[in-house]
Amino acid sequence: MTRIVRISYIVLLVFVSLACGLISNPISGAQNFASTAEAVATSMPLQTLEALGTSMPEVTQYLNPTGTPVTQWNNIPIMSQAKAGQEFNKNTYSFKASGVTATDVQTFYNAQMKTLGWTSSFSAQGGTQSATMLFTKDSNVLSITVTTVDQDVVVLLLLQ
């Protein structure tokens, strides 16, 4: 064998060895990761996971308020187009309105809150289907989320 052929074989052998090492290292790394994840999952008590699921608020309830809407909630005006409204706790109220768009709700609250001395801190609109607004006054923060459900607009008020 010539010297060039021997060097070629050695280079090929080194290359194949390196390639096999590069392939097997990610596989063993994935196996180690899977073993670690399995160990963590089995060490967690099941009651903790169940408690997490049951303590999460059911946010879909906010999209379907029931009851007669009020004209004001915590000194915050409610649109006259509201056809249903519900207070979920002292900081959360939502109402459903017909015949308005998210843009109409934004226009209404920008004008009303400014008149009441609130400052607009953030406003984003998702076309005529949704909007998010944030108002501040003194140490109070009001978040208004607007979304369209079926033919109605649902407005969620969160006061902190």
Image: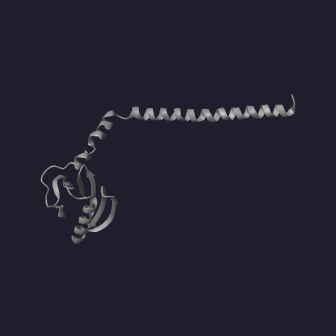
Residue sitting nearer the eye, 9 or 47: 9
Is residue 12 rendered to the left or right of residue 57?
right
Farthest residue toward the top? 1
Residue 91 placed where, x, y %? 21, 56
**Residue at screen point 24% across, 54% down:** 153
Residue 124 placed where, x, y %? 34, 61
In the picture, the quarter occupied by the N terminus is: top right
**Residue at screen point 27% across, 42% down:** 55
In the picture, the quarter occupied by the C terminus is: bottom left
Position of 89 relative to 142 (above/below): above
Residue sitting nearer the eye, 111 or 128: 128
Position of 138 relative to 128 (above/below): below
Is residue 133 rendered to the left or right of residue 28?
left
Residue 111 placed where, x, y %? 24, 69
Q: In which quadrant of the rendered view does residue 40 lie?
A: top left
**Residue at screen point 33% across, 60% down:** 125
